[in-house]
Amino acid sequence: MCGIVGYTGPREAGPILLEGLKRLEYRGYDSAGIALVDESGDLFLAKKAGKLANLETEINGRTPHAALGLAHTRWATHGRPDDLNAHPHQDCSGEITVIHNGIIENFRELRDELEAAGHRLTSETDTEALAHLIEDAYEGDLADAVRAALRKVEGAYAIAVMHKREVSRLVGARLNVPLVVGRNGEESFIASDVSAILAHTNQVVFLEDGDVADVRPTGIEVTGVDGRPRSRELTTIDWTPEAAEKGGYETFMLKEIHEQPEALRQSLAGRLGRDGRISLPELEPMAAAVKAATRVELVACGTASYAAMVGASAIERWTDLPARVTVGSEFRYDPPPLDGRTLVIAVTQSGETADTIAPTRLARERGCPIVAVTNTVGSAITREADAILFLQAGPEIAVAASKTFVTQVTTLVVLAAAIARLRGTLPDDEEVGLVRALQALPSAAARALELNGPGASELARRYVNSRGFMYVGRGATYPAALEGALKLKEISYVHAEGYPAGELKHGPISLLDAECPLVAVATRSATYDKLVSNVMEGRARDARVIAVATEGDPQIERFADDVCWVPDTHEVVSPVLAIIPLQLFAYEIARARGTDVDQPRNLAKSVTVE
Ligand code: AGP
């Protein structure tokens, strides 16, 4: 997804902006650009398709002297990912420079009107229309002009704008796309997310929908698009810049896989009482709504939807409520019946996924009580919810989710238990058993890493030439099979399917042969024996079998060619441990195939368009 970084202050803007773009590379992008204005109002602009290195080559690794500037990484939505469509974009005079994340939905009408009025638009982008709209409205005050232009715009945006004649001023604005402003002494920053500017400041303002920020070296003023002042607090971010870097690992993803024990520890901190009880104070203000609920709808996309499946199954196990998961893109246009007694749980690590936010908003409009589960403070989903459960997993930079999956699972399981307790349906011994299992989970995850890390590359070597993989699970283990298959697809570009094991014989078994192995998530569960029978059917078709199994399982080696051992745990949270060898396996297959693990092709970390 696109990235924004802007600077105004006493220092050289160019290096700060390029470094900021590097920190945003994890979001995925297909072109990059930079614009700088010096104190005499001279403008420098460069943009280039492809990786940031192409832009650096274009400018010979040097940026000219300037203390004001904007830079952008673009992930194409309107128009090809080429030099011309790369941001920044400008008005006819070349005085106004704009960068933008999101989509201007009425851009065709705006473009037609602008062209009819004599403006010359040179790119295929929706963003360029904004620059010309601001030009039309400009009467000497950039913030006024931005506000006037935005009053004509429909869609979703985070923008940053500068004008050659206002040499220390940036204007930012957001609607449904994140934007933060950072402050540090005599300098200010603007960015699409905190990691771009964390090396310079941990004091930030998370802009809210409809905010327009007038950003100067000495401070910021926030108004609405109507010009009325809005009050916004500075937030202190406790993520260090180091926390967002790779540490000693070769990629962010490997670092994040290894951070899972710590992420689980942090995420569970405060949610497990010493008395053996679940503690979820965030849910207390919603107690009446939880007690009155007649059903639960979970909405999420991708990895988050697999974690949501674990949550739904835990809710049905411990409460009298039916619970269902619908992916956001389906929920939005074919919603289930929604009313004030439908508890909606929105799960999104980024908190900015358009396909998850829109259905959540719809549910809110229909009066549903809403719980958001997210990793991102200040994100859009937090403004839609009655209660917010933060994952507290720390920043996840690799595009493929790892530590946010395991913390989503535990957070949702804690939520399920808290709902059950509020409704009086959670037996005491179940709660005590669950809390014990959750307390042991961080060290069990560390053991799963120790057991599987050293052999992962050798295991991958044996299977790297396979045509495709069939991941199977049953009951509690099925979400781990889906997530394992997604990990392999995302980062190695090898085809993998996740199936309920019992479904193999209804079709996909025809794919199995010596070139298409079965990956069976066969940890201890109520349906273990059934799963084993299904896997035997696959083995009879010459499929090699990789099994993820619980330590001490006496029979698994009889039917598996390779076994990835994980510690025993409560069946409900077993995907947290089962996914660890599957993450490592996907990682090593990707490494063996030489793909870009942290930024796989065609993918973005937070998908803020529909
Ligand atoms: C996970 O590896 C994927 N990158 C993707 O499926 C992701 O989980 C999905 O886009 C949802 O993202 P969110 O949790 O930020 O809403």
Image: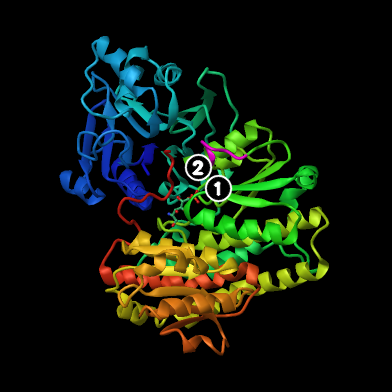
Answer above or below: position of 517 versus 411: below
153 or 36, which lies in front? 153
Q: Residue 330 carries which label?
A: 2
Q: Are marks 1 and 2 in contact (CB under 8 Å)?
A: yes
- Name the residue type under label 1: Thr
Residue at (56% x, 58% y) in the render: 307
Residue at (21% x, 18% y) in the render: 120
Q: Where residue 186 sits in the image (x, y, percent)?
A: 45, 37
- Name the residue type under label 2: Glu
Tell me if residue 61 can be seen: no
Answer above or below: position of 465 versus 330: below
Residue at (44% x, 50% y) in the render: 195
User: Taken as a whole, is the magenta stretch helix, strand or loop?
Assistant: loop
Q: Which quadrant of the structure image shows residue 364?
A: top right
Q: Is mark 1 on a helix, strand or loop?
A: strand
Quarter of the picture containing the C terminus is: top left
The residue at the far front in this view is 506
Q: Is mark 2 on a helix, strand or loop?
A: helix
Indicate yes or no whether the magenta region holds residue 340. Answer: no
Q: Which mark is residue 326?
A: 1
Answer above or below: position of 247 versus 165: below
364 or 504, which lies in front? 504
451 or 240, which lies in front? 451
Way the structure is coloured: rainbow
Q: What stretch is highlighted in magenta?
A: 329-336
